[in-house]
């Protein structure tokens, strides 16, 4: 790249590099977390802090050694210990956090490379909330109309706008533009995402007199009305998940159903309508759904549809030649 180590300019660079600050494992991780604060959200920051502490606790007094003493074998032993005490999923999450911090250290030229990146992920059993039947949807809706209208409205954002529960929890009054029928929210794959509010939900929101509330208020709170609620996003989500558990107990629904099940159910319903009533091909239906569901890519949406078994074929009995 044209670097000449004999020029005064490059000798100064090499001299500075030679005398640069040395970091212990603990101080290097702390430094990486400080750099990443402006790059990731609050929840990810908490994960980085928690997972870095796990590594420091595992190394014990060894965390005071130079960052250069840490190698791939030690990290693998650490991840094996995490998996033994928790689960493959937690192990993978910890690995992801440590790898992200090591990428920062690599970019800052504190370590030569991020070797954590090359460590494999363990296979996990992915939990997928089960899709509701039409009868179950009617039962849940009827029960909520009688007992918890606020939770029903929360679920309508998941069902009609296809938001994830935690995305609904982040909604503030200022995020809802009733005049233009638009919704602004922090999505999984984008810091600020814009979606149209369908008329089926828009008319109900207009009846809530949202203009009378502070624009910084959260739309959904434990008070069943817009208000301030200074807790973590995950705590707000858990609040509504626990409320839905009470509904499940009353209606006899098991643990395979959750609020996420409404997203699966209504995406499945819309996809099958496009395939059967609109006679769209699979690819046409995916193209049509992509801006509605908010998935990042066709591949991502296709994987999602496969995961929830949305593409159910028509009866094939007449195609079978040999009947037993």
Image (cartoon, helix red, strand yellow):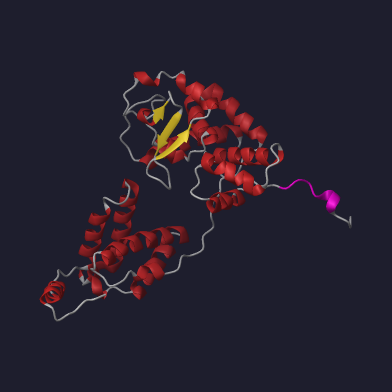
Position of the N terminus by quadrant: bottom left
> In the image, is residue 148 above or below residue 104?
above
Q: Could you tell me which residue is drawn at 62 percent across and 38 percent down? A: 270
* Residue lying farthest to the front in this orientation: 2
Is residue 104 rendered magenta in the image? no
Residue 98 rendering spot, x and y as whole percentages? 34, 62
Q: Could you tell me which residue is drawn at 40 percent across and 29 percent down? A: 176
Position of the C terminus by quadrant: bottom right
Q: Could you tell me which residue is drawn at 41 percent across and 27 percent down? A: 177
Residue 132 rendering spot, x and y as whole percentages? 62, 39
Task: Inspect this view and state whether residue 257 appears.
Answer: no
Task: Inspect this view and state whether residue 161 appears.
Answer: yes
> In the image, is residue 185 above or below residue 153?
below
Q: In which quarter of the view is residue 84 placed?
A: bottom left
Is residue 315 rendered magenta in the image? yes
Residue 252 rendering spot, x and y as whole percentages? 61, 36
Q: Could you tell me which residue is drawn at 34 percent across and 26 percent down? A: 227
Span colored in magenta: 313-319
* Residue lying farthest to the bottom in this orientation: 6
> In the image, is residue 96 above or below residue 137?
below
Q: In which quarter of the view is residue 193 placed?
A: top left
Query: In the image, 209: left or right of 162?
Result: left
Query: In the image, 276: left or right of 3?
Result: right
Viewer-side residue, 217 vs 313: 313
Query: In the image, 20: left or right of 205?
Result: left
Viewer-side residue, 96 vs 184: 184
Residue 236 rendering spot, x and y as whole percentages? 39, 37
């Amino acid at each position: 790249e044209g670097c000449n180590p004999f020029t005064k300019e490059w000798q100064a660079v090499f001299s500075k590099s030679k005398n640069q600050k040395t970091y212990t494992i603990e101080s290097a991780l702390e430094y990486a977390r400080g750099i990443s604060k402006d790059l990731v959200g609050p929840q990810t920051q908490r994960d980085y802090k928690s997972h870095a502490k796990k590594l420091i606790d595992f190394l014990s007094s060894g965390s005071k050694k130079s960052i250069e003493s840490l190698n791939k074998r030690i990290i693998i032993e650490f991840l094996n210990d995490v998996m033994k005490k928790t689960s493959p999923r937690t192990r993978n999450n910890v690995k992801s956090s440590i790898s992200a911090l090591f990428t920062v250290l690599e970019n800052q030229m504190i370590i030569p490379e991020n070797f954590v990146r090359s460590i494999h992920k363990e296979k996990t059993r992915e939990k997928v909330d089960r899709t509701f039947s039409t009868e179950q949807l009617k039962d849940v809706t009827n029960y909520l109309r009688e007992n918890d209208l606020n939770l029903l409205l929360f679920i309508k954002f998941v069902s009609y706008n296809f938001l994830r529960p935690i995305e609904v929890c982040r909604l503030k009054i200022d995020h809802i533009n009733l005049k233009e029928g638009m919704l602004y929210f922090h999505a999984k794959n984008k810091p600020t995402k814009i979606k149209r509010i369908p008329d089926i939900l828009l008319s109900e929101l207009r009846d809530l007199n949202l203009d009378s509330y502070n624009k910084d208020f959260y739309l959904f709170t434990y008070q069943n009305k817009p208000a301030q609620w200074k807790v973590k996003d995950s705590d707000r989500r858990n609040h509504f998940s626990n409320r839905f558990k009470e509904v499940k107990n009353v209606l006899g629904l098991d643990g395979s159903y959750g609020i996420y099940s409404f997203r699966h159910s209504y995406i499945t319903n819309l996809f099958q309508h496009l395939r059967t009533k609109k006679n769209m091909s699979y690819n046409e239906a995916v193209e049509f759904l992509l801006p509605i569901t908010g998935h990042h890519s066709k591949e991502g949406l296709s994987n999602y549809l496969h995961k929830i078994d949305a593409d159910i074929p028509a009866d094939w009995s007449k195609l079978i030649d040999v009947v037993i």
